[in-house]
Amino acid sequence: MTSAIDEVVLPRSKPLSGRLIAAAAFIVPPIALLIVAMGLALRGGGVAAEQWQPASVGVVASLLVLAAVGAIPSVPRAAWPALGSFAALIAWSAASLLWSASREATAENVLRLITFAAATAFGAGYAARPRAALSLAASLALFGGLAAGLIELKLLSGSTSAFFGSRLSWPINYANADAALVWLPVPPLLAFAAAYPLRPLVRGMFGLLAALALAVGLAAGSRGAAIALVVALIASVAIARDRGRFALTLLAVIGPVAFVAARMMAGDPSSSSSAARERGGAALAASAVAAILVCGLAMLDRRNRFPFRERDRRVALALWAMVLVIGVGAFAAKAGRPDTWLEARWNEFSNVHPTLTGDVSHFGTGFSNRYEYWRVAWRTFEAHPVDGIGSGAFSVPWFRSRSIDENVIDAHSWQASALAETGIVGLALTALVFLLPLAAIRNARDGRDAWPIASVALGGTAVYFVVHASLDWLLRIPAVAVPGFVALGALATGGRAAGDLAFTGRVGRAALASAAIVVLVLAIPVYLSTVAVDRAESKAATSTKDALAELDAATELNPFATEPLLVRATILQLDRRPRAALRAATEATERGPQNWTAWLALAGARQSDGDSAGARAALDHAAALNPRAPQLRRLQRSSARTGARDRW
């Protein structure tokens, strides 16, 4: 049996022409996005505005430059519905500024969506051709290998700072995202480990990297990531034409990792360097064994010996059936009946006030706050079924309706977030953005040239991203979201692009350039406002005048932002200028009438200005917006005692 990648044959009768070299250069933009994503990962995931906003501006500016020089490939018509859905989602999200409970959050989220739409467009335009799609898949594989390698070095160095409790929390400082960082590219790594034309040593190297990624990802203890990975691997096997070869390779990689899985999650590396090094050593050993097994399979494959020679599917099916039987038996012996175990986990999941003992991050428990996130999201949807509360504004209903003391700004699911923030319309558009590219996987699998193998790599990655984003807040973590959307964009073409480059016409380039200019005009002031606030906070300790000047600029640059006004009010209070602080805090409540921190700042400003009754009223307003805020309860009790003394 031959692999689907066998169809990839580079011309040998004549040297590479300048046109072929130029065509190869057109895969650079999406690969550059992967490099940007890795840079954001090493800075903490790019969650903070000062991290992702410059990247966003850079991506849009790149589109403008490419359009200006005519270097924009035409997007296959098959990808138009997905890109059109993304444009409609952005338009609907921007329209929600008219009714948003937090216009500041909505404006920021619209810019984030534009960044992801650009990443999708890069994937659809530059990775639509067969060899370009294969190059993108290889780049994703190297992305995962690099991420896993960096984490492995951290483990082997015995770094306790890489952990939060028993869970890996580096480089993104959020265990679930760290798992996503290394598990998102596992399907491409496995696809190349199973690629028949590659030499056995090369396939063994990809097997090593795949096993290393799987092993270090286990150290994060992410259940959502594990669910997404299982679904992605099943999807990858289903997509592959050479399912037997792929399934055998998958078993060769997973087998050694399974033997060290318990060790990868044991101990408390946050307080013991030896525990961190032990995890690193276990991951390295499993990876080495996997490399040997994959290399051995590859050599047997090359010589067409057992288990190959048209028997690999039957052998793979028998081996996997045996593994599943043993696994289910071992699980039943340890945990009891599966239905009883699942019922217990559901009861843990739906208990919003659990009695926690030990580390609840392990895979054997169901404790999670997501049930509460999704409950609040559903209640918000019921109150605003069509339009939602405003794109990105989930924190407003959350602080008002939560029953647990946790500060979150996202519903931890793209479905729940869409329902709460943009209503049924937003959910429909978001679903089209995510699911239309997945629906095109079948066509990509049947595509020409390198698309069959690229569809396995990119399809598995896309399935992982969509499933994991259903269980976590990955859309606010660009280090993971950007590679996911690039893969979705490439898949949206369905492998329909021709092998030769075709460029967008003048009208298309002019439209794209005009759109990029509009976005830049809106985005650059937002970014400059963020930078100005950062500078003001740095200058506040040395020069109040300079800090206030920066905050004035930040306030003017972003008409939706409340943070510059809140920082200004704080600085002015410390500078004993209560009237000026009161004006800044009042303007903050006007910009963000449902921002409880703005009302808290107003209460402080009124108290400094001698208005005790006004301060109590502002505190009551803040408490109505965030009833569970402990600092508000303390201030209300203190204010009540002060008011009683005043009346006496």
Image: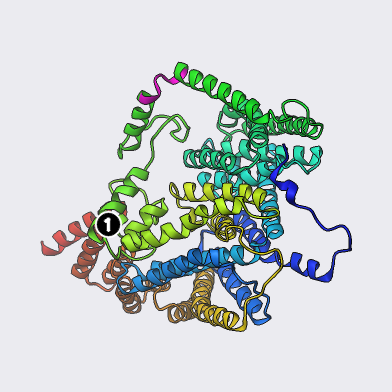
Q: Position of residue 150 (x, y in %)?
A: 68, 46
User: In the rendered view, would you say 605 is above or below 648?
Assistant: below
Q: Position of residue 364 (x, y in %)?
A: 45, 29
**Quadrant of the image containing the C terminus:** bottom left
Residue flagged by tag 1: what amino acid is it? Thr
**Horizontal side, residue 477 vs residue 66: left or right:** left
Mostly what secondary structure, the magenta segment? helix
Badge 1 element: helix
**Horizontal side, residue 389 vs residue 556: left or right:** left
Magenta residues (range): 334-339
Is residue 555 a member of the stretch shown in magenta? no
Q: Position of residue 630 (x, y in %)?
A: 30, 51
The quarter holding residue 85 reads bottom left
Q: Residue at horizontal 46%, vertical 16%?
A: 333
User: In the rendered view, would you say 220 is above or below 364?
Assistant: below
Q: Residue furthest right?
A: 14
The quarter holding residue 340 reads top left
Residue on which the image places disc 1: 380
User: In the rendered view, would you say 66 is above or below 438?
Assistant: below
Residue 385 seen in the figure:
yes
Q: Who is closer to the viewer here, 89 or 597?
A: 89
Q: Residue at horizontal 45%, vertical 52%?
A: 473
Which color scheme does this rendered protein use? rainbow
Residue 50 seen in the figure:
no
Q: Residue at horizontal 32%, vertical 77%?
A: 587
**Quadrant of the image containing the N terminus:** top right
